[in-house]
Image: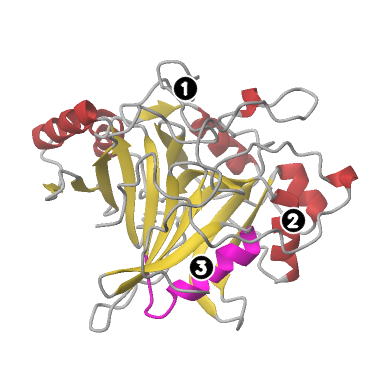
């Protein structure tokens, strides 16, 4: 099975494109560059899922006591900012896993629950995975043990999680090959039991995988490929060093993909200004009304916020809408970037970020990968 078990030494992929648009002038592009294996996407940062009308003891116990996330106090600060701007958010908790997070708003709107159309993969060390299984059993939490030892878990509002064993050197996931949790700076709230979000896997309609792959290749310049798991086409988009977004097609006879409910993912890119300009030219930049204080009508606005949003994944060959998934696209200057302390004051990237890994592609992840 492919999903979620990518370890150190996984091959670099062969489909790679350069920036499709000329970069803006140097006066607007003083953003540092943090070199990573899977350029230019630096890391997957968070998954945002509405958790209902009010925060409950059940939610707190599941995310922090059972799953082993760290309770990040910045969530309350962001909630206050949204409320001050007129947003409907009634509460916000952040559950940290390594350098990644689940953002869990409540009361936005009242009783709103969001469920990712797929699953989120979380990595744990061998010892922590065994401890997680014991906590799940003690809490009578909904879960099953896979044939590979992974744990398939359902959160209190219905999101599917998969906890997988990380067998390589212990590391968090981010813009560095190895981020030893014993040496690196944890996010506010202290260290977590899990190493981080390794992948998010989405169910997509039949026939969508190749077009979605083209979307990431041409809009983001991402490292990506399409292959098959048995008869199922899957697009894999790689980020940073150890992370991926996966888009798995429904097969004939399987239930249709559920309607999109507004959940979103956040990621960091080394090519922020160019990705914004390509998105704007394609008519994809989107102002989310739930954040009335954030607008991205120009590159200047996007640079001011160090982020912008899009939600329509379209086939660049045909313009067809293939999938809806809000992306919060961030630059490394975003105040929430977990590794900003690595960026020198003069705006140069800190050195020796990448580590020792092959700079030329090895064999692809899918022997029968599709040409795009």
Residue drawn at x 34%, y 50% is 120
Q: Pick whichever of labels 3 and 2 is earlier in the sequence.
A: 3
Q: Where is residue 225 in the image (x, y as percent from the top left)?
A: 47, 64
73 vs 3, nearest the viewer: 3
Q: Which residue is drawn at 66% across and 45% down?
A: 270
In terms of depth relative to the viewer, which is nearer, 89 or 346?
346
Q: Which of marks 3 and 1 is in front?
A: 3
Disc 3, SS: helix
Residue, disc 2: 274
Q: How crowded is mark 1: few (under 14 residues within 10 Å), some or many (20 or more)?
A: some
Of mark 2 and mark 1, the one earlier in the sequence is: 1
Q: Is residue 137 left or right of residue 261?
A: left
* Nearest the eye: 256 or 268: 268
Q: Can residue 39 be seen in this view?
A: yes
Is residue 106 among the parts visible in the rendering? no
28 magenta-colored: no
Residue segment shown in magenta: 203-220
Dot 3: few (<14), some (14–19), or many (≥20) neighbours within 10 Å?
A: many
Instruction: State whether residue 340 is above or below residue 298.
Output: above
Residue denoted by label 3: 213
Kindly identify the residue that appears in the image at 73 percent across and 23 percent down. Answer: 344
Q: Residue 172, percent across and down?
A: 42, 31
> Disc 2, disc 1: CB below 8 Å?
no
Name the one closer to the observer, 163 or 335.
Answer: 163
Q: Mark 1 points at which residue?
A: 186
Residue 131 spot, x, y in % from top left: 17, 28
User: In what element is the residue under mark 1?
Assistant: loop
């Amino acid at each position: 099975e492919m999903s979620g078990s990518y370890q150190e030494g996984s091959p670099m992929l062969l489909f790679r494109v350069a920036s499709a648009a000329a970069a803006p002038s140097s006066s607007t592009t003083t953003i540092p560059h943090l070199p990573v294996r899977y350029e230019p996407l630096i890391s997957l940062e968070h998954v945002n899922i509405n958790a209902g009308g009010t925060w409950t003891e059940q939610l707190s116990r599941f995310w922090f006591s059972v799953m082993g996330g760290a309770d990040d106090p910045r969530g309350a600060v962001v909630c206050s900012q949204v409320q001050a701007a007129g947003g409907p958010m009634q509460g916000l908790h952040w559950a940290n896993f390594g350098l990644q997070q689940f953002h869990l708003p409540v009361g936005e709107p009242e009783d709103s629950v969001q469920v990712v159309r797929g699953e989120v993969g979380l990595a744990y060390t061998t010892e922590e995975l065994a401890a997680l299984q014991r906590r799940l059993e003690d809490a009578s939490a909904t879960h099953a043990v896979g044939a590979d030892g992974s744990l398939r878990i359902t959160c209190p509002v219905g999101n599917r999680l998969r906890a997988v064993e990380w067998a390589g050197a212990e590391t968090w996931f981010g813009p560095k090959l190895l981020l030893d949790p014993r040496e690196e700076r944890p996010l506010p709230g202290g260290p977590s039991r899990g190493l981080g979000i390794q992948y998010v896997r989405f169910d997509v309609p039949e026939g969508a995988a190749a077009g979605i792959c083209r979307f990431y290749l041409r809009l983001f310049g991402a490292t990506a490929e399409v292959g098959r798991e048995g008869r199922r086409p899957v697009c894999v988009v790689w980020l940073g060093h150890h992370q991926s977004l996966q888009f798995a097609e429904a097969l004939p006879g399987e239930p249709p993909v559920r309607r999109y409910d507004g959940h979103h993912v956040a990621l960091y890119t080394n090519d922020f200004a160019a990705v914004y300009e390509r998105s704007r030219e394609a008519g994809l930049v989107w102002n989310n009304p739930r954040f009335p204080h954030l607008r991205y009508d120009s590159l200047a606005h996007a640079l001011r916020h160090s982020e912008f949003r899009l939600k329509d994944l379209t086939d660049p060959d045909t313009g067809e809408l293939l999938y809806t998934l809000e992306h919060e696209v961030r630059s490394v200057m975003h105040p929430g970037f977990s590794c900003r302390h690595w960026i020198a004051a003069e705006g140069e990237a800190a050195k020796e970020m990448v580590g020792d890994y092959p700079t030329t592609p090895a064999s692809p992840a899918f022997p029968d990968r599709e040409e795009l």
